[in-house]
């Protein structure tokens, strides 16, 4: 019976904490089917559990679905091709800002002849060297040739983005705001072009001296040479390379060439995924935009060669994503989007691997929290707690690399099986209800009788006084006579030794009967341990040969064997030998089978024949006669209505005077448990 303990609330209690009993109930069917604790726990992690009052958890499948939904939402929201439109728009705004500044300067200039309106010297003025003078008020008058030249320069810019950037690279903007915006645009493009592989260097690129930039190009050249050696099977000098350039790789430089390649390939994957997800013409234009921002052909060439080498050496598949949305996305956000999608893909791979292996150690909890929020990490932590909770409760234990059921866990399975059996019985038909009280195995009923000499003096006081009142009539005191005594009748529970024979032939497994038979064995064991501790239960499995199954071996017992056969003869011999240890009380055999015997023993060896030979039938029935002679009752539970089996079982009941039942797997437990309880009781006078 479940017990509850109450305490005052101190803020540390978790009302939604997972319960080990609920976890065992959720795994019970699988554990009773195959007994593999690791497999059952892995499947529980996969499917999750509803739980009571919010104590459940979502499984790996649900987490995978949520990750897929996150990916779908991003793909259906954004239009990735808009990245170049956004860059073009930013450059157009910069040029528009410059034009407005030039035209405003012309409108605000003093009249001709004023000192302030004096135009710059033609010898020193050019579109590449702006002077903040204020020429005449006419925007395009001959008095301000320096402004006219700049406007004409802007009008003659190439139509493509890369050409415009190249032309503007040496142009000094008249508008400080335009100059600042252009520098910011170029800095962003440089960082994206270089930062896909060298994040630390990308942040320092703008402030690099010519000497530092030259060293960067030398490092890229040596790195490409080293990767070429790796491709051609030569031995690169990685240690020498890191001694020379190790400071360029941050505080935690790679320790091997393979690690360096993996780091660079991983960082490049986001940009590569972006390129792969774009239409071809958009991809080429974006590549030209990024290359134009570097403004160094040698540096751009080394980076292109490095990308080609990494493409050859990296084993990662270059992903492409199909975006169908309408919302525009800038380049920086697009790269973050690639990072998120790449993280989602990686998490899906980790969760899928966890589904197969049952290990959650390789799942990146921080990445999961970044995508699914704090609740995603919380669900992962719940999954990681399952095994610990079950071990702390004493239901599972770790033995080497295996996770196995403890005796307490096996008892828990038996109790659940027994509870399921009683739950299917009509309410009120039987009185096998849980109780917190413990006592002897003799239980008083509500039926009473007049006391006779020798009866147990379990007096029904109320009925005895009523008998005295009826006898003497009204008045006090009430004088009780021995003839007035009324006592309770008791049920005497006799001792019983039982052998449960489980057919383990292939047909039992193929027909789905063996799992039901194992569940009955566990339930019957729990019933005897709880209510009839003086009784004894043995379990025998039989196929080609028979063997005794210990209680702890029942969950892992399986059906079928390499050799065929249903050797009832050997099983009955073993059962008779086990029951011979008990000379008092009732002795019985409960046999669960779905077919007639097809094997018997000859000088310790099994002989198989199908259809059954006369010798197999003869030897099996001979063993039935020996059991009958020793007072052992055989009750047979048939799982199939096969005519040959029914005729054979009829012969067993004729010889042994036992009983035969036909049962489906769903009702097998009810038949056996209730038959056991009924046979345990015989009415005696109290």
Image (cartoon, helix red, strand yellow):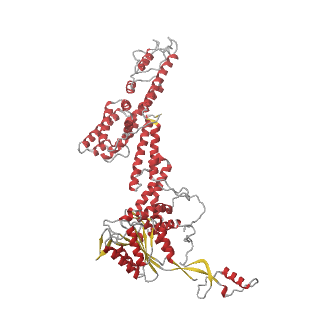
Residue 644 in sight from this viewpoint: yes
From the viewer's side, name the closer residue of 434 and 507.
507
From the viewer's side, name the closer residue of 650 and 174.
650
Task: Report the residue at 25% width, 42% height from top.
Answer: 231
From the viewer's side, name the closer residue of 641 and 66.
641
- Residue that protrudes farthest toward the right in the picture: 475
**Location of residue 25 in the rendering, given as x and y in whole percent from the top left corner:** 49, 62
Residue 397 in sight from this viewpoint: no
**Location of residue 222 in the rendering, given as x and y in whole percent from the top left corner:** 28, 39
Residue 277, image quadrant? top left
The quarter of the image holding the C terminus is: bottom right
Residue 583, image quadrant? bottom left
* Image height of 603 relative to 1, above or below: below
**Location of residue 666 in the rendering, given as x and y in whole percent from the top left corner:** 47, 64
* Image height of 366 relative to 474, above or below: above
The quarter of the image holding the N terminus is: bottom right
Horizontal relation, residue 270 to residue 138: left or right:
left
- How many numbered badges does the structure rendering display? 0
From the viewer's side, name the closer residue of 305 and 7.
7
Horizontal relation, residue 169 to residue 607: left or right:
right
Task: Report the residue at 44% width, 54% height from top.
Answer: 46
Horizontal relation, residue 624 to residue 608: left or right:
right
- Residue that protrudes farthest toward the bottom in the picture: 453
**Location of residue 152 in the rendering, given as x and y in whole percent from the top left corner:** 42, 17
């Amino acid at each position: 019976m479940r017990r509850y303990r109450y305490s005052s609330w101190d803020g540390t209690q978790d009302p939604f904490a997972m319960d080990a009993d609920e976890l065992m109930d959720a795994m019970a069917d699988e554990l009773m089917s195959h007994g593999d604790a690791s497999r059952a726990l892995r499947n529980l992690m996969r499917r999750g559990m509803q739980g009571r009052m919010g104590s459940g958890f979502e499984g790996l499948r649900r987490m995978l679905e949520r990750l897929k939904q996150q990916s779908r939402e991003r793909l259906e929201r954004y239009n990735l091709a808009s990245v170049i439109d956004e860059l073009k728009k930013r450059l157009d705004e910069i040029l528009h800002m410059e034009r407005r500044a030039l035209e405003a300067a012309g409108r605000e200039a003093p009249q001709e002849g004023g000192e302030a309106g004096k135009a710059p010297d033609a010898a020193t003025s050019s579109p590449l060297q702006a002077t903040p003078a204020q020429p005449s008020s006419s925007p395009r008058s001959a008095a301000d040739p320096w402004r006219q030249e700049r406007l004409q320069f802007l009008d003659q810019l190439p139509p493509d983005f890369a050409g415009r950037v190249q032309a503007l690279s040496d142009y000094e903007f008249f508008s400080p705001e335009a100059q600042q915006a252009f520098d910011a645009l170029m800095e962003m493009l440089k960082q994206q072009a270089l930062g896909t592989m060298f994040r630390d260097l990308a942040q320092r690129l703008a402030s690099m001296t010519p000497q530092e930039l030259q060293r960067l190009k030398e490092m890229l050249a040596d790195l490409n040479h080293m990767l070429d050696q790796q491709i051609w099977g030569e031995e690169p000098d990685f240690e020498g390379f890191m001694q020379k350039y190790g400071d360029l790789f941050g505080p935690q430089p790679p320790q091997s060439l393979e690690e360096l390649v993996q780091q660079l390939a991983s960082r490049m994957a986001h940009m590569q995924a972006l390129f792969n997800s774009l239409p071809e013409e958009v991809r080429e234009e974006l590549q030209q935009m990024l290359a134009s921002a570097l403004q160094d052909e040698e540096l751009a060439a080394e980076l292109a060669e490095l990308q080609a080498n990494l493409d050859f050496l990296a084993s990662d598949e270059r992903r492409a994503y199909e975006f169908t949305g309408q919302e525009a996305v800038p380049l920086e956000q697009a790269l973050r989007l690639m990072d998120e999608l790449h993280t989602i893909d990686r998490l899906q791979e980790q969760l899928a691997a966890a589904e197969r292996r049952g290990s959650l150690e390789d799942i990146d909890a921080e990445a999961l929290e970044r995508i699914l929020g704090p609740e995603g990490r919380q669900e992962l932590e719940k999954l990681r707690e399952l095994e610990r909770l079950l071990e702390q409760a004493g239901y599972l234990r770790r033995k080497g690399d295996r996770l196995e059921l403890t005796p307490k866990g096996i008892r828990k399975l038996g109790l659940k099986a027994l509870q399921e059996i009683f739950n299917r019985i009509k309410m009120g038909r039987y009185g096998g209800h849980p109780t917190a009280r413990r006592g002897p195995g003799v239980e008083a009923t509500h039926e009473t009788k007049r006391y006779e000499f020798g009866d147990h003096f379990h007096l029904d006081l109320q009925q005895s006084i009523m008998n005295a009142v009826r006898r003497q009539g009204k008045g006090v005191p009430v004088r009780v006579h021995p003839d007035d005594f009324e006592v309770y009748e008791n049920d005497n529970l006799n001792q019983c030794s039982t052998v449960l024979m489980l057919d383990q032939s292939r047909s039992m497994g193929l027909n789905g009967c063996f799992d039901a038979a194992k569940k009955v064995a566990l339930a019957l064991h729990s019933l005897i341990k709880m209510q009839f501790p003086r009784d004894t239960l043995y379990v025998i499995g039989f196929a080609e040969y028979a063997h005794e199954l210990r209680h702890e071996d029942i969950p892992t017992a399986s059906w079928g064997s390499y050799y065929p056969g249903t050797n009832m003869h050997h099983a009955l011999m073993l059962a008779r030998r086990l029951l011979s240890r008990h000379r008092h009380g009732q002795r019985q055999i409960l046999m669960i089978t779905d077919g007639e015997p097809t094997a018997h023993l000859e000088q310790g060896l099994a002989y198989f024949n199908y259809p059954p030979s006369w010798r197999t039938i003869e030897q099996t029935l001979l063993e039935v006669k020996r059991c009958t002679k020793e007072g052992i009752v055989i009750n047979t539970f048939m799982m199939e209505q096969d005519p040959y089996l029914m005729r054979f079982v009829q012969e067993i009941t004729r010889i042994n005077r036992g009983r035969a039942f036909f049962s489906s797997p769903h009702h097998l437990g009810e038949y056996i448990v209730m038959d056991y309880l009924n046979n345990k009781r015989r009415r005696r006078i109290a």
